[in-house]
Amino acid sequence: MRPRIVDLHVDELDWVPLGPPGLYSRLLSRDPETGARTALQRLTPEDGYTPPDTAHFHHTYEEIIGISGDFSFDSRRWVKPCTYVFHPPRTVHGFASAIRAESTFLSRVGRDLDFNFVPEPEADDLYVVEGKAPPRAPVALDPEETLRDFVAGELLGSAVEVRRLSVDPVSGEGSALVRLPKGWSNRLRNVPEYLEIFVIEGGLKVDGKAPPAGRAYFFYPPGESVNALEAAQDTLAYVNFGGALGL
């Protein structure tokens, strides 16, 4: 299981080259046993980054939310700030990858990432190969879709505005955007399943301490206590949860 991480100041981390020119990463958390990890990644064409030119799939899920920039897996739907993409295991994508500007995105995977290239894909849109489709279906939502249709929901023990992005109908594991009004505070003190929070805009006080100037990241393993959190200002956060949390 990944370790407990509280109030990681993301913007203070170094960008680490991943190998291909122009591809960098800030690792936020990782499970040493499975390789499951969350990272902020950066694509920099000025440093030589070029998108893959062949469709491919992974044997683990890949989940992305855009933070800045403009890139695409198919040259039709573009990943911009708050674009959300979920590729279940064995989902073919990358049919016509392209990039318009330096881009950053939050990337989550369920194990060490493998690449399986498909030179002649059967379709030009997301589809699953090698067996039965998983219950949590592929999702591709643009910013207009992710930032509308928020509803009242119970999260961390207090009513907030929630936009569910993708949820497994069997396990309840999923992802959501949440809007926390200034002054919001949580009452929940432990979580039955894992809880992961990435602050996109705004800031959270932790145990009364002022938030960092930039983005922050949290990961609570199952059964862990949750710090006293308070929205120092109106806050937009990307939240991932290992089971139903009343959303």
Image (cartoon, helix red, strand yellow):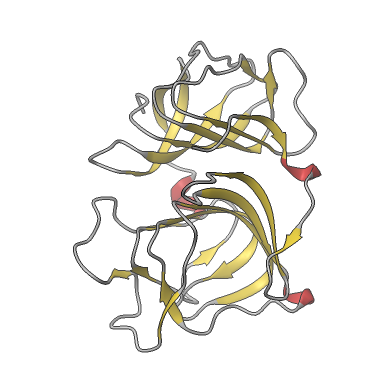
Q: Is residue 95 visible?
A: no
Residue 165 vs residue 204: left or right? left
Query: Which is nearer the eye, 224 or 23?
Result: 224
Above or below — where is 208 with respect to 98?
Answer: above
Quarter of the image where one finds residue 149: top left
**Badge count:** 0
Query: Which is nearer the eye, 158 or 148?
Result: 158
Quarter of the image where one finds residue 21: bottom right
Quarter of the image where one finds residue 59: bottom left
Furthest residue toward left: 132
Q: Residue at x 55, y 79 (%)?
A: 52
Position of the C terminus, as image quadrant, is top left
Above or below — where is 121 with respect to 26?
Answer: below
Residue 167 vs residue 79: left or right? left
Q: Residue 44: image x %, image y %?
A: 73, 70
Query: Which is nearer the eye, 107 or 36?
Result: 36
Furthest residue toward bottom: 120
Furthest residue toward front: 33
Q: Residue 237: image x %, image y %?
A: 57, 35
Q: Residue 197: image x %, image y %?
A: 56, 34
Q: Residue at x 49, y 49 (%)?
A: 36
Q: Is residue 189 visible?
A: yes
Q: Residue 74: image x %, image y %?
A: 46, 75
Q: Residue at x 24, y 71 (%)?
A: 130
